[in-house]
Each structure stands twice: as C-alpha cells, then as structure tokens.
Image: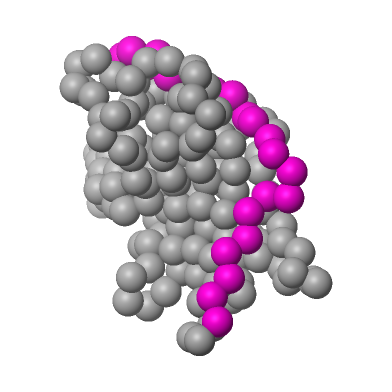
Amino acid sequence: MVSMANRSVLMALCLVLSSIACIANAADTATVPRSLKVDPAESGLLIGSIGARVGSPFQSYSILFGPASEKKAKGRLFFQDGAFLGTKPNYAENGIQYAVFQLRLPPGDYLIRDVQFFQNLGTVQKTINAREPFAVPFRIEKGKATYIGRFGGHGILAGFGKIFVVPVAGY
C-alpha cells in the first residue's frame, strides 16, 4: 500500500511530467519573426492556449499579435487541425481541444490585432479575418510570465460567419 506522503510525491511528479509534455509541444503553436527573438535572460514569457472545437469546418485558427509600437502584427499563435500536419492538443474541455503555447519575447507592450480562420476544401481555400479592427493589449516583463488566456475556436459557419471565443478573465 502507498503511504499518503508517497502518494503526494507521486501526484506532484505526474503534474510536473504532464507540464513538461505540454511545454514540449508549445513550439508547434507559434511563429515569431527574428526581430522578436531574444536571449532568454533578457526576455519574458507569453503563455496561454489555443484550440478548436472537434469537427470544426476550419483547419487553422490563428491569433495575430505584435509590438504595440508597430502598425502590423508580427507574430502568430495558431491551432491547426489535421491528421498529418495538425497541432497536437494538450487537453480538451467542453468539446474543444487546446494546445498550450509558450514563447519568449522582448519586454514591452504588445497587442493582439486580429484573428484568422483558414478552410481548405481541396480546390477552394478560404481565409477569414476579423470584420472590424481591434486591439487587445498585454505586457511582457523581463523575467516574468504573462498569461493571456485560453482561446477556443468554435468555427460555426452561418452565411460565412464565425465564432472565436475570447476569455474576458484572461487579461
């Protein structure tokens, strides 16, 4: 029989190992231009998760972000659904599969500037962006982690409409 102390150690070990597995997959969910890459000692950490509803009509969901001082988004956080090139989900909740992302960024103010949905129907491909411009601010501080939330794409098509759930409490 396992003692209560050993059970606690075993649970902590399981938690650490599952976190390592999530973080190992995190590089598959972000693209960052060279201009935003930085020495780990001089950076902060951006953390969150992105995902899509199982059976969604879209193959890719993206969040576009960049430094607040620049006019265009430079980085991309994405979830790609698919058998061959898909993002490996780390967890699922309420029918949505999520992948955890983490990336190092230079300290500063940033904006989430757009969302993007991609659908590939073979001979027809469609990319849909947000209808209206928007900006959701977040700040990266040296040596600190910034959690920006959990983003779940529902991908409901109704007259080419779409739904992307953005957590209010994540900011």
Q: Is residue 3 visible?
A: no
Return the residue nearer the eye: 86 or 106.
106
Return the residue nearer the eye: 106 or 142.
106
Specify the quadrant of the image occupied by residue 34. Answer: top left
- Residue pictured at 64% horizontal, 31% vertical: 135
In x, y percent, where is residue 40? Answer: 21, 23
- Residue pictured at 34% horizontal, 45% vertical: 31
In x, y percent, where is residue 85? Answer: 33, 70
In x, y percent, where is residue 33? Answer: 31, 38
Tell me if residue 139 comes above or below residue 104 in the rendering.
above
Residue 134 drawn in magenta: yes
Q: Is residue 145 visible?
A: yes
- Residue pictured at 52% horizontal, 22% vertical: 68
Total of numbered circles in the picture? 0
Tell me if residue 149 comes above or below residue 95 in the rendering.
above
Q: Is residue 156 left or right of residue 159?
A: left
Specify the quadrant of the image occupied by residue 158. Answer: bottom right
In x, y percent, where is residue 100? Answer: 41, 47
Question: What sort of colour scheme is used for the picture?
Answer: one colour
What residue occupies the far front of the structure in this picture? 71
Q: Is residue 97 left or right of residue 164?
A: left
Q: Quadrant of the C terminus?
A: top right
Return the residue nearer the eye: 109 or 69.
69
> Magenta part of the protein: which range?
124-144
What residue occupies the far bottom of the structure in this picture? 123
- Residue pictured at 37% horizontal, 51% vertical: 29
Return the residue nearer the eye: 108 or 11.
108
Residue 82 drawn in magenta: no
